[in-house]
Image (spheres, rainbow, N blue to C red):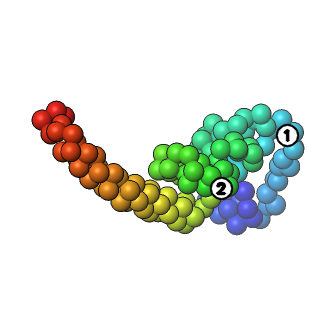
Amino acid sequence: MTRASASVLLWQQKDFRLLEPVVEEKKEDKSSTQCRKCHRSINPDDVYCRHCGERQSQSAHWLYHPFTLIILAFVFIGPFAIPLVMRSPFLNKRNKMILSFTITLYTFFTLYMVYRILIPAIDQWQELREELGLTGIY
């Protein structure tokens, strides 16, 4: 309660003298901490805030580190890494969008190159089938 609100309260009660408000000192409770997002009191052992759901620990799984995401996306799993990119706590929204867009472009480029390689191979396969007389089969 501030001095102004105490004054208003006393004015409404028809008591015109000003009193200093009683300030209660908060004791530091070592058994609780504050949430990083909503700043409410939570248990220090909590991984997520029970009020807003924000993750409290600073460490994240190795899978969400940017270097790991880039290796996974461009070498192993391609566009299936986009959900991991979106969940990464190490990247801000702008970097997530840039990396997702880059992964998508890289995927389309890779598919186009595979198509360019396969067309001559399919043409050679067709010619071989015609030479062997296997046009009716398959």
Left or right: 138 as drawn, with respect to 11: left
Q: Which residue is mark 1?
A: 29
| x and y, in percent, of residue 38 in the image | 64, 50
N-term mark: 1 or 2: 1
Q: Quadrant of the C terminus?
A: top left
* Discs 1/2, front: 2
The picture quadrant where one finds residue 47 is top right
SS type, badge 1: loop
Q: Is residue 2 left or right of residue 75?
A: right
Query: Front-most of 105 and 131?
Result: 131
Q: Is residue 37 above or below residue 29?
A: below
Q: Is residue 108 visible?
A: no
Kindly report the distance in space between the C-alpha atoms of the residues bearing marks 1 and 2.
37 Å
Disc 1 residue type? Asp
Q: Check disc 2 and give the amino acid type.
A: Pro
The crowd level at tag 1 (other Cα within 10 Å; few <14, some 14-19, many 20+) is few
Q: Residues within 10 Å of mark 2 (few under 14, many from 20)?
A: some
Q: Residue at x 32, y 56 (%)?
A: 120
21 sits left or right of 99 in the view: right
Q: Which residue is denoted by mark 2 in the rendering?
A: 66
